[in-house]
Image (tube, helix red, strand yellow):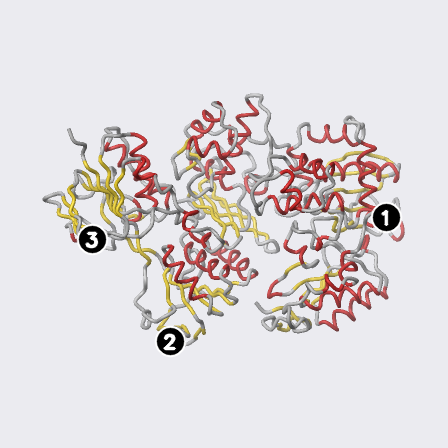
Amino acid sequence: MSKPTIIVVGNGMVGYKFCEKLVARSANYNIIVFGEEPRRAYDRVHLSEYFAGKSAEDLSLSSVSWYADNHITLHLDDPIQEINRSSKTVHSLKGLSLKYDYLILATGSSAFVPDIPGIEKEGIFVYRTIEDLDLIKAYAANAKNGAVMGGGLLGLEAAKALIDLGISETHVIEFAPRLMPRQIDSAGSAMLQSKLKQLGLNIHLNKSTAYIAGEHKIDALKFNDDTSLTIDMLVISAGIRPRDELAKLAGLHTGSRGGILVNEKMQTSDESIFAIGECALYENMIYGLVAPGYEMADVVVSQLIGTEKSFHGFDMSTKLKLIGVDVASFGDAFVTEPDCRTIIFEDTHKGVYKRINISNDGKYLLGGILIGEAEAYNMLLQTVNNKIVLPPNPEDLILGSRGESVSEGAGVLSLPDDALICSCEAVTKATICDAVNDGCSTVDSIKKCTKAGTGCGGCVPLVKDLIAGTMKANGQYIKNVICEHFDYSRQELYDLIKINKLKSYDLTLDHFGKGDGCEVCKPAVASILSSLWNDVIVKQDTIQDSNDRFLANIQKGGTYSVVPRVPGGEITADKLIVLGQVAKKYGLYTKITGGQRIDLFGAHLNDLPLIWEELIDAGFESGHAYGKALRTVKSCVGSTWCRFGLHDSVSFAIEIEERYKGIRAPHKIKGGVSGCIRECAEAQSKDFGVIATEKGWNLYVCGNGGSKPQHAQLLASDIDKDMLVKYLDRFLMFYIKTADPLTRTATWLNKMEGGLSYLKNVVINDSLGIGTSLEEEMQSLINSYHCEWKEVINSPELRKRFAHFINAPEEKDPTVQFEPMREQLKAKW
């Protein structure tokens, strides 16, 4: 008896997933696939990575032999032209006529191209396929500025693509009054817009295009408000249109605004024809994400093998990184009071916006929005989807526990077994935990075993927590490796680099790694090298932070800021005068920082060595504001001037800052010294804080401000200066040696087994017997101090790096412009 024939029309991600799911569950069908494109199914979710170096083969979802190995007949570059429902036959462009028993329409969607006069001109593209990207890439080679029409998810992805292609001036044109209007609210959109502007993207809102100017090729956009924008190329990303034309020709029912009508079984108006993915219209909704399409595919497979499963809509929560900025929305993001209570956290300095909506009784999380920082997204989504009762202080969900000890993995382990962890592949918590219990101990092995994390990848942090939590519950050793290129934790790699006296990333990779490395391990190893050898950061073959390349902070509009060290916040009148003279000479904006220093903004790249030279001649040094290093030790005036001061806090702050200046760590370090309990130096909000007492000094550790403020905790009380410095040496060196990459001291302590009690035993009681060693290692770093600015100005080779044009080192960036603001100048952007 011959097998029934299934013909799949469309070989995109959803069509491929249908085939993958069907062959995994049944061998009772003859499967034939027709694809319109000339290549196998590929990953459109990560399409922009094509511009970052990935090849079409890298993006492919299967090997060349996969279809044949699974007895699937594949016809590429041969779209179906006609469906004859009465004879159950399809006819292809190349003349094939085949009969089917079941037909799966997975035709996807096409880019919506608005009917604007001039849309046919040369230099206008859509952003959907690899072929589209090849055309964009070729044209961009001769373009200086470009625009993307559409400020939604795909539009911002396309804008990133133009930036990656080297388009110096990239614009986003959006008809709506805000970016991503379907995903985030006005305040979140404003924060996103601010972040994107800082990265050099030009945003134009409330813009309706009247026509596209240019003789044969585009040279400008003309808007209905009588303004215009000169551009060399345009990418259209104004939404999608379901590909339902084949269904219409066959007489299948479609929606008035497009889409093939389907029921909960994904059946069309013809019971033997199913529609899945972006071409399917379920209850007046087109689902434009890959995860719902995969779920639809699974529903159809269930019908075909005789099991019950229905489609009843899908959670459209999403998290992604747009041009380096985290953006997420989940649950009911737009519900407002009085239908809920809303908690909002906003930090305009760091570009962070968080909003959560909770039920009026305070019991349940309804939804929310995260901009700039979205680490909590996965657990927040699980809290919504599983109706988990909220803690007494629901603001902790976005602000953190603020001082309470956190048990890593406990949150995710408390989820119900049927909690959906990977929505793309419909993988539950129980499935992942069972796989860990069966021996899968890495993310890669979980991917192979369960498929979790193989779609958009957004669930991977949650998968990692489940692996760690399950292994820990089983009493198994958990190895916290840096990344796939190094099978070591940061602490292990630190010791290996030290023992083998390795001085570069390349040598470290050759000795202990594999592959070419990545954006995770390169800065982590750079941090270790800096913390061990304290060499000039610009001499290393890789860096911990992009600011390190310039020994200055990259600011808006292509400018840089310069922050000289002012130990303890004490500065002479002569030095203040020099700062004023330098600021005037180089046209710099000046501002006093929260760390009691003066920040000089608006420097051109090739002016940096000149500015440093003048500052060093006046007795200043680099303030390391650009590095993961000691920033400042803030002080109050103490007993020198204050009638309440118990001890000389300024002198002690200067002594401490001079001791630890230039020392690199996993993250930035801040300190403070207060002359009495009134705490004017805010020492308890620092990584280390010192407060004077009647009997000596109290030492506090592991505090921080920022988006998740946490008070420092008392490590030792009523000790003298020498003992305090000894403990501080041990504490800082222990942190440098054992913390994970990019981990502040507060988070390091929160994750430490035994918490503060364990830290006290190590630092004060020397329970590990390493106290002397820690002190000696710290002294070695102190002895190796150098001012990085001075190293550059004394080296002709290093100075050459600080030029905008290599062949014209004295010429400044012509795109940097300034405008007046309160008797100073600020960069235009």
609 vs 128, left or right, is: right
Asked whether 710 or 125 is in front, the reply is: 125
532 vs 306, left or right, is: right
The answer for how far apart the CA atoms under marks 1 and 3 are is 81 Å
Task: Say which residue appears at 41% left-offset and 48% top-offset.
Answer: 57
520 vs 289, left or right, is: right
How busy is the neighbourhood of tag 2: few (under 14 within 10 Å), some, or many (20 plus)? Answer: many
Please name the residue that numbered disc 3 is placed on.
Answer: 94
What is the number of callouts on the image?
Answer: 3
Q: Residue furthest top?
A: 475
User: Residue 588, percent across and down?
Assistant: 70, 69
Q: Nearer the viewer, mark 1 or mark 3?
A: 3
**Amino acid type of the residue that numbered disc 1 sits on in the rendered structure:** Glu
**Amino acid type of the residue that numbered disc 2 sits on in the rendered structure:** Ala
Q: Which mark is residue 655?
A: 1
Q: Quadrant of residue 756 in the image? A: top right
User: Residue 738, percent across and down?
Assistant: 69, 36
User: Residue 564, percent across and down?
Assistant: 77, 59
Looking at marks 2 and 1 on the same chain, the residue that comes earlier in the sequence is marked by 2
Task: Say which residue appears at 13% left-offset and 43% top-offset.
Answer: 88
Judging from the image, what secondary structure is the residue with disc 2 in? Answer: strand
Q: Nearer the viewer, mark 3 or mark 2?
A: 3
Task: Say which residue appears at 65% left-offset and 41% top-offset.
Answer: 743
Please name the residue that numbered disc 2 is placed on.
Answer: 213
The answer for how far apart the CA atoms under marks 3 and 2 are is 39 Å
**Amino acid type of the residue that numbered disc 3 sits on in the rendered structure:** Lys
Judging from the image, what secondary structure is the residue with disc 1 in? Answer: helix
The answer for how far apart the CA atoms under marks 2 and 1 are is 65 Å
